[in-house]
Amino acid sequence: MRKRNWRLVITGLLMIVLAIGFFAGMALLMTSRSNDPAALMQTVGQVSGVVGGLGLVLATFGAIGRRTV
């Protein structure tokens, strides 16, 4: 039997939502003001991808859980 770690699951899902929100917010608000919107979105995409990936790993490890005795 495995016990889920709900703190990891919730934190991972929150990180995924924040990464999506950051990407969408930067795309809608900051791209029009930037001198180089392509470079800006490339950087924002990389940051959002890393944060979303970490969130996915956290949520997966939390959902798998720990073995109980």
Image (spheres, rainbow, N blue to C red):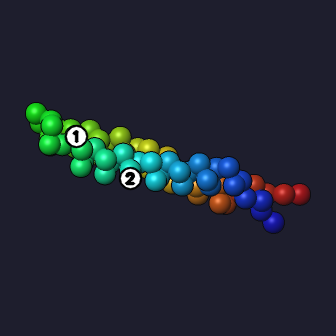
Amino acid type for the residue under numbered disc 1: Met
Q: Is residue 46 visible?
A: yes
Q: Residues within 10 Å of mark 2 (few under 14, many from 20)?
A: some
In the picture as drawn, the residue positioned furthest to the bottom comes out as 1
Q: Could you say where residue 36 lies in the image, as x and y percent from the top left?
A: 12, 36
Q: Earlier in the sequence, mark 1 or mark 2?
A: 2
Amino acid type for the residue under numbered disc 2: Ile
Query: For the N terminus, which image quadrant?
Result: bottom right
The span from disc 1 to disc 2 (Cα, nearest Å) is 15 Å
Which-is-in-front pick, marks 1 and 2?
1
Q: Residues within 10 Å of mark 1 (few under 14, many from 20)?
A: few
Residue 33, picture quadrant = top left
> Residue shown at 24%/48% (left/top)?
27
With 42 as the anchor, is 9 left or right in this view? right
Q: Is residue 42 visible?
A: no
Residue identifier under label 2? 20
Q: Could you say where residue 29 lies in the image, as x and y percent from the top left?
A: 24, 44
Residue identifier under label 1? 30
With 42 as the anchor, is 59 left or right in this view? right
Residue 35, picture quadrant = top left
Q: Secondary structure at mark 2?
A: helix
> Residue shown at 36%/45% (left/top)?
22
CB of mark 1 within 8 Å of CB of mark 2?
A: no
In the picture as drawn, the residue positioned furthest to the left comes out as 35
> Residue shown at 77%/59% (left/top)?
3
In the picture as drawn, the residue positioned furthest to the right comes out as 69
In the picture as drawn, the residue positioned furthest to the top comes out as 35
